Image (cartoon, rainbow, N blue to C red):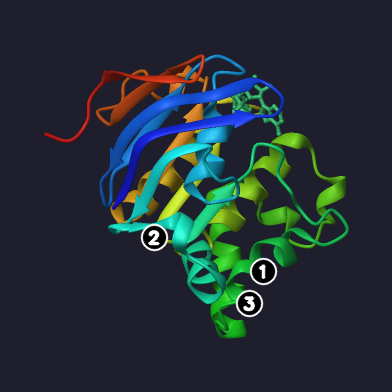
Amino acid sequence: MVELIKVSKEYPPDVVALKDISLSIGVGEMFFVIGMSGAGKTTLLKLLCSMEMPSGGLIEISGKPIAQLRGYHLARLRQKIGVAYQDFKLLTDRTTAENIAISMEVSYKKPAIIKKRVRDLLDQLGLADKHDTITGELSRGEQQRVTLARAVANSPTMILVDEPTGNLDAITTERVMNLLNKCNKAGATIVIATHDDSIYRHTSHRVMELRRGRLQAISGGLP
Ligand SMILES: Nc1ncnc2c1ncn2[C@@H]1O[C@H](COP(=O)(O)OP(=O)(O)O)[C@@H](O)[C@H]1O
Ligand SMILES: [Mg+2]
């Protein structure tokens, strides 16, 4: 589904964030990208959702180079990708429910369906009582979960999550992972960037490590 061929990313003037990354991500796969701070995890996710363009190499989605996508086709691709950003990017003057509803509203879902989906997600993430709270007033751990709920709400085919458990306790971390596992079982491809080893220690999914912009397999993967 997604193929990276010798992809590199440099930030001016001379930061090499990713170097010669070759990677295939299968449809419906869930996998972890781990690595220390500064290793390139966030940059890799930004390339996957075409928020950044590579400096070298090729990224293909369903056999098509994403660099060639423009306008409508690029917008359509982005609609199929849900991203939970490391720095959240919430509308902090809007409520929790409004933030989560956004991705569904832009794809013209019915209001009753949106309402139900928002409530379900908030229940699953232990945020039922924050439905009408302005997100700027939430704790970081709560904002992080709203970010995740917004990313998955519209059932995208690919979900990218950047450090989804950084501000969470063990029980809330489990809720987050349960939700991601559920999305994966429903067919979504999921890429999780993390340095929280509690969420990948016992996983049977593929784990890849970035070290100074280079990628290596640690465990698991498709047969
Ligand atoms: N917009 C940017 N401009 C310049 N350098 C950047 C930018 N974004 C990231 N970097 C640098 O690229 C490297 C990889 O960063 P990042 O992908 O955020 O790593 P991680 O998410 O693993 O902590 C780091 O050295 C970081 O400082
Ligand atoms: Mg990061």
Q: Amino acid at mark 2?
A: Thr
Q: Is residue 94 left or right of residue 112?
A: right
- Please name whichever residue, 5 or 152, is drawn nearer the observer in this view of the structure: 5
Percent across and percent down for residue 36 are 55, 14
Residue positioned 65% across, 69% down in the render: 101
Give residue 6's position: percent from left, percent from top.
Answer: 36, 32
Left or right of 155, for residue 141? right
The residue at 54%/51% (across/down) is 50
Mark before the other along the chain sequence, 3 or 2: 3
Image position of 200 with respect to 211: above or below: below
- How many residues crowd around disc 2 within 10 Å: few (fewer than 14), some, or many (20 or more)? many
Looking at the image, in which quadrant does ligand 2 appear? top right
C-alpha separation, residue under disc 3 versus residue under disc 2: 17 Å
- Counting residues from the start of the chain, the first of labels 1 and 2 encountered is 1
> Which one is nearer the viewer's eye here, 187 or 81?
81
**Disc 3, disc 1: CB below 8 Å?**
yes
Q: Which residue is mark 2?
A: 157
Quarter of the view holding residue 142: top right
Image spot of residue 159 (x, y percent): 46, 50
Q: Residue at x 58, y 21 (%)?
A: 16
Amino acid on which disc 1 is placed: Ile
Q: Is residue 95 above or below residue 141?
A: below
Q: Which residue is mark 1?
A: 102
Q: CA distance from mark 3 to mark 1?
A: 5 Å
Residue 157: x percent and y percent? 39, 60
- Distance from the alpha carbon under mark 1 to that under mark 2: 17 Å
SS for callout 1: helix
Q: Which mark is residue 105?
A: 3
Residue 15, quarter of the rendered image: top right
